[in-house]
Image (spheres, rainbow, N blue to C red):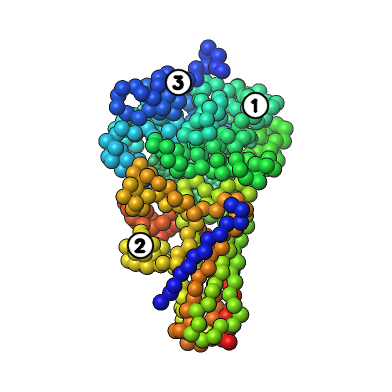
Amino acid sequence: MIALLALWACDGDTDGPTAPTDAPADTGDTGDGLVHDPLSMPASPTLDPARFRDAESCRACHPDHVREWKTSMHAYAMHDPLFQALVEQRQVDLEGREDQFCTQCHSAIGTRGGEITSGFSFAELSPIVMEGITCTACHQVEEVVRTRNSGHRLQQDGPMRATIADPIDTPAHASEAADFMGSSEFCGACHDVVETDGLDLERPYQEWLDSPAKAEGTGCQGCHMPTTRRALVDGGPERDAHDHRWVGVDEPLTDGFLTAQELDDLRAGTRELLTGAAALTVDAPATVEVGRTFDLTLTVENRIPAHNLPTGSTFVRQVWLEVVVTDAAGDVVYETGTLDANGDLRDHWSELDPYGDADLLSFSSRLIDHQAAPTVFTWIADEHASTTLPPGYVRTATLFVPTDDVGTWPLTVSARLRFRALPPYLLRLTGLGDRALQVPIHDLATATTEVAQR
Ligand code: HEC
Ligand code: HEC
Ligand code: HEC
Ligand code: HEC
Ligand code: HEC
């Protein structure tokens, strides 16, 4: 029998008359029985999607930005089959009362433009709405109103805004430097997600506010939009061009969204981002008497100075410790964090071995419904319980490993801190089971040690 005592410890713990904006036209309570927000989920349209130019229209002059954006999760946001499946489930469960909620960030243009209303269907949306977080959804932001739930004001005929103070004139568009485009607030306006009942779902911006990165003046762009020095347009001066791939941990599930080469590049980018994100140590006694149980002490540190590990959609991400102890013949003496035949962790969600891994050490978060049962649906969640690691935090756990069944000594202890964007059970639950095993597992850190017979 394997006993566990996991001891968790933390070490310190303006628009001109010709340029209309989508200013609030109504209040949240419009009497139609639907959930609205005057800025981001308006009851009547506050902008016209047809007035927003698509990404293709930028290509002639900004080919690199377009090429990079097309491989990004921002371009994927409305095509994501997992997103679509969850939105459709919410439409059914809530009988269309909150159909603008999920799309307010994934397509602000569609949600504010009247295409996304109660009972909408993805198949009927126009191409600019399906472009999701397209160029103009960011570059025609006029102001950051709040740092959550699509907190931007958009200006449909406004200038293109970034941080170049002296842009070369172009007949294609007016340009304007806006400091907020270089700020974390700009990203936080979409990246911090709060459910309609007030439950915090995602909060990288809130996490960043207390972080060493903020103190040093490094915002989201500093890590997620690295720069290269080059001319933006032929014959123009050299500028700091910002990477528009927004490498994170996720990758598209739809065939053909990326070429094989683009997918390789994205995965390489993810591996690079994850390098050095965490540190892992494992301590065990050098020798143990046969038959005695010994302590394995593991420490995990979040080395990302900016936000928790993981952050964002932590309730779908999986970060966990795999620890396998083998004897000299290679037979497994002890294991935790290993997968069942479906590729799932052996926790609540495993179909083959539910709760079969009592020692499992997880660093993500769980949504819990009003009956205290785990759920993946944010709209029925009452509680969001997180074991993510804040910046710089170290967490220590002790596992107890019995040695009664050891054949041949010495023992080898192998530990890995593993990361997976999407678990197989979630994909099966949302009708995407055929994609379940294509999601890669990244090892953030590994550690090994040996234990000899005393
Ligand atoms: C006909 C060429 C052309 C087209 C088409 C074009 N741009 Fe530009 N854009 C430029 C030039 C030139 C600059 C200035 C570059 C410089 O100063 O180095 C610029 C600058 C910008 C800036 C920086 C503004 C600032 O002051 O920081 C943004 C943002 C931008 N463009 C976005 C877009 C988007 C989005 C599209 C498509 C909807 C687009 N552009 C289409 C030529 C073009
Ligand atoms: C110091 C560099 C750094 C800064 C600054 C930074 N990040 Fe990250 N970010 C990372 C690393 C490393 C990862 C990969 C590990 C992870 O997922 O937590 C990551 C992952 C992410 C992810 C994917 C998380 C997931 O697991 O789904 C999102 C979303 C994200 N960051 C958003 C932000 C936002 C928003 C900001 C600004 C408030 C920000 N980041 C600032 C380094 C940084
Ligand atoms: C998620 C929001 C977002 C989207 C989508 C987006 N951009 Fe940007 N873009 C930015 C930010 C933020 C900056 C400036 C970063 C800074 O200065 O710190 C920027 C900068 C730029 C610049 C100025 C040069 C540079 O690299 O700094 C150009 C040109 C540009 N973007 C074009 C585009 C085009 C074309 C698209 C669509 C293919 C696009 N952007 C999509 C956020 C976005
Ligand atoms: C208009 C809303 C919006 C804005 C503004 C925005 N994002 Fe995002 N971002 C999203 C959404 C939605 C996704 C996920 C799309 C999906 O996978 O379905 C995303 C995905 C990402 C990812 C990929 C995460 C992963 O797990 O791979 C990164 C990294 C990221 N954003 C960084 C940024 C940064 C940095 C900024 C600010 C410069 C920014 N975003 C601005 C909405 C936004
Ligand atoms: C406040 C803006 C916002 C709202 C509202 C929002 N999202 Fe997102 N969504 C994001 C951002 C930002 C990310 C990227 C986070 C990350 O990668 O960690 C994201 C990522 C996702 C992903 C990608 C996860 C993956 O790995 O493929 C899915 C699926 C998703 N959202 C579904 C939904 C659903 C369903 C709703 C409604 C219940 C919703 N979102 C509401 C901003 C939002």
Asked if one can make out residue 132 in the rendered structure from this viewpoint, the answer is no
Which residue extends farthest right? 237
Snapshot quadrant of residue 179:
top right
Q: CA distance from mark 2 to mark 3?
A: 46 Å
Number of other residues with Cα within 10 Å of mark 3, as a class: few under 14, some 14 to 19, many 20 or more: some
Instruction: Give amino acid for label 3.
Output: Pro
Disc 2: which residue: 350
Instruction: Give amino acid for label 1.
Output: Ala
Residue drawn at the location 63% of the way across and 40% of the way down = 219
| Label 1 vs 2, first from the N-terminus | 1
Residue 139: x and y, percent? 56, 30
Q: CA distance from mark 1 to mark 2?
A: 51 Å
Residue 281: x and y, percent? 60, 66
Q: What numbered label is drawn on residue 24?
A: 3
| Label 2 vs 3, first from the N-terminus | 3
Disc 1: which residue: 177
Q: CA distance from mark 3 to mark 1?
A: 25 Å
Snapshot quadrant of residue 11:
bottom right
Q: Split into 4 quadrants, where in the image is the N terminus?
A: bottom left
Instruction: Give amino acid for label 2.
Output: Ser
Q: Is residue 347 above or below residue 205?
A: below
Number of other residues with Cα within 10 Å of mark 2, as a class: few under 14, some 14 to 19, many 20 or more: some
Residue drawn at the location 70% of the way across and 35% of the way down = 239
Question: Left or right of 182: which side holds 254?
Answer: left
Secondary element at image label 2: loop
Question: Left or right of 116: which side holds 364?
Answer: right
Question: Left or right of 176: which side holds 106?
Answer: left
Q: What numbered label is drawn on residue 296?
A: none
| Label 3 vs 1, first from the N-terminus | 3
Secondary element at image label 3: loop
Q: Is residue 130 above or below residue 156?
A: below
